[in-house]
Amino acid sequence: SRTMPRNRLRLVGALAAILVAAGLTAGTPAQAHDRPATLADLAQRHGRYFGSATDNPELTDTAYTSLLGGEFDMITPGNGMKWYATEPQQGVFDWTNGDQIVNLARKNHQRVRAHTLVWHSQLPDWLTGREWTADELRAVLKNHILTEVRHYRGKVYSWDVVNEAFNEDGTYRDTIWYKTLGPGYIADALRWAHQADPHAKLYLNDYNIEAVGPKSDAYYQLAQDLKARHVPLDGIGLQAHLALQYGYPTTLEDNLRRFSKLGLDTALTEVDVRMILPVTDEKLAQQADWYRDLTSACLAVRRCVGITVWDYTDKYSWIPAFFPGEGAALPWDEQLQPKPAYFAIREALGGK
Ligand code: G3I
């Protein structure tokens, strides 16, 4: 029944007034208004998301998870959905790590960019430790994709279906998939993923494809070809692992736009901007400019749907372990304090 007796209404009104006066209501409109806008809030004003990667071991750090839950509206598991984690024995699936992150995201009203189904790295030993015929390997791949995508069906926004398929010169990377199955594995993978979750956005994802060049050209041609053959492809993920010493990819916006014109979404999926240590104010300022510019580039292209940083704090960045002597790549420092890059992103998103 939609109507309430008038005296009951008056009582409810009086109670509410008392609660407000006593400061007992959480999230009154006034409070909501006073809360500073998060990166997610600011991005949403442009119809975009602002996301972060995360990883299971970090989730016991409550200062960390509080910022992760508050500032972002899209989450990517940095490792938890990869093959070695999800199918450690052939046909034996383990969803523990992926589920933990999906459940946390759901609790925080965040969406999930799922990562990744077909890659040459972080594969389990049972898969890399023997020879497979094409028929055998195709069956292994199909079962992995169908099972994992079905498990997360309806729970994730998108999938990085194939990760890092090309070399720098635009030739196919000579992976177990390419060597055994030929280039057709990419279309197969997309079709199987679509079959298992018709609503998930399906992406190809790679690094060093931010600028126009041989590697991004390879994606452009592949995307064009897949579209012409009606293979289910929704987007191209540009990882954007940038480094101050190599220069800013000035053709980023043009590059995003050419994929948009093919009818594809684009996203910056693993952003970080590393530097050679030690950190200086000058490098931090340059890094801030780069974060500002890449955010503006995404906003300038209609189908660039969002930006994800590859974790948000230098405390949990992958960089120092992989590039000794480099680091400080993310918008928050190791003490979880915002850096100039953070304020530059806010500015680019139109916040203060
Ligand atoms: O799980 C083991 C743990 O048992 C062991 O004690 C520890 C000791 O080194 O290693 C742990 O595994 C590490 C794993 O991350 C989980 O933390 C691996 O050594 C480490 O190599 C691995 O690094 C990941 C990397 O992919 C592997 O290539 C990074 O965390 C992850 O952020 C990174 O993400 C990739 C994207 O998937 C694709 N694009 C590039 C990006 C950066 O490399």
Image (spheres, rainbow, N blue to C red):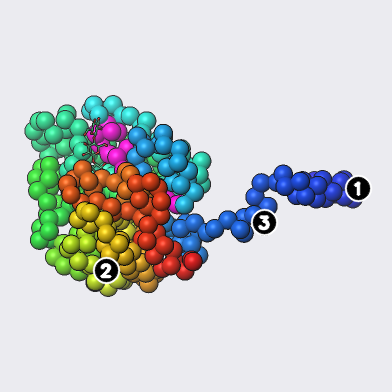
Towards the viewer: 65 or 324: 324
Looking at the picture, which amino acid does disc 1 mark? Asn
Q: How many marks?
A: 3
Image location (x, y in percent) of residue 215: 16, 62
Report whether residue 135 is seen.
yes
Looking at the picture, which amino acid does disc 2 mark? Leu
- Magenta region: 72-87
Q: Secondary structure at mark 1?
A: helix
Q: Residue at x 20, y 32 (%)?
A: 124
In contact (CB < 8 Å): disc 2 and disc 3: no
Q: Secondary structure at mark 2?
A: helix
Camera-side mark, 3 or 1: 3
Query: In the rendered image, which residue does mark 1 sit on?
Result: 7
Left or right position of 143 against 134: right
N-terminal of the two: label 2 or label 3? Answer: 3
Q: Does the magenta-highlighted stretch encompass residue 83? A: yes
Q: Disc 3 and disc 1: Cα gap in Å?
A: 25 Å
Q: Residues within 10 Å of mark 3 (few under 14, many from 20)?
A: few
Query: In the rendered image, which residue does mark 2 sit on?
Result: 252
Ligand 1 sits in which quadrant? Answer: top left
Q: Does the magenta-highlighted stretch encompass residue 281? A: no
N-terminal of the two: label 3 or label 1? Answer: 1
N-terminal of the two: label 1 or label 2? Answer: 1
In contact (CB < 8 Å): disc 1 and disc 2: no
Q: Disc 1 and disc 2: Cα gap in Å?
A: 63 Å
Query: In the rendered image, which residue does mark 3 sit on?
Result: 29
Q: Residue at x 81, y 47 (%)?
A: 18
